[in-house]
Image: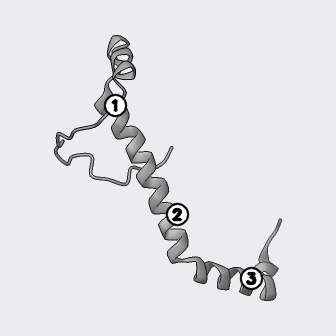
Amino acid sequence: MSTLHFDTSAPKKATNLSINSDLLRQAKELNINLSQQVEGYLSELVRKAKEQQWRTENAEFIAAYNKRIEEEGLPLEKYRTF
């Protein structure tokens, strides 16, 4: 399970969403908590976007590190027991 990456104690803020009316009706009939579900999905989208942003911002370092390991091997590799 991933660590939450936002302040869960932050106050809720009302917002407007445009949702297919039939889908909304069915969700209400099934007692689906839209706020909870949208927040969960949005949280996952934000997490993935931040992960991709981090990978992009650090791509040069990651490539350089991988090249160094490829050329020089792992640090302290001679002490590995596996």
Crowd rating for badge 1 (residues with CA inside 10 Å; few <14, some 14–19, many 20+): few
- On the image, numbered disc 3 is attached to which residue? 69
Which of disc 3 and disc 1 is earlier in sequence? 1
Residue nearest the observer in this picture, 1 or 50: 50
Q: Quadrant of residue 42?
A: top left
- On the image, numbered disc 1 is attached to which residue? 19
Q: Is residue 22 above or below residue 60?
A: above
Mark 1 is on which residue type? Ile
Q: Report the Cα–Cα distance between label 2 and label 1.
A: 27 Å
Mark 3 is on which residue type? Ile
The percent coordinates of residue 38 (x first, y second) are: 35, 36
The percent coordinates of residue 55 (x first, y second) are: 55, 70
Q: Report the Cα–Cα distance between label 1 and label 3.
A: 50 Å
- On the image, numbered disc 2 is attached to which residue? 52
Q: Report the Cα–Cα distance between label 2 and label 3.
A: 23 Å
* Number of numbered discs visible in the structure rendering: 3
Residue lying farthest top?
29
The percent coordinates of residue 82 (x first, y second) are: 83, 65
Q: Secondary structure at mark 1?
A: loop
Q: Secondary structure at mark 3?
A: helix
The percent coordinates of residue 10 (x first, y second) are: 19, 48
Residue nearest the observer in this picture, 69 or 36: 36
Q: Is residue 18 above or below residue 68?
A: above
Q: How is the image coloured?
A: one colour
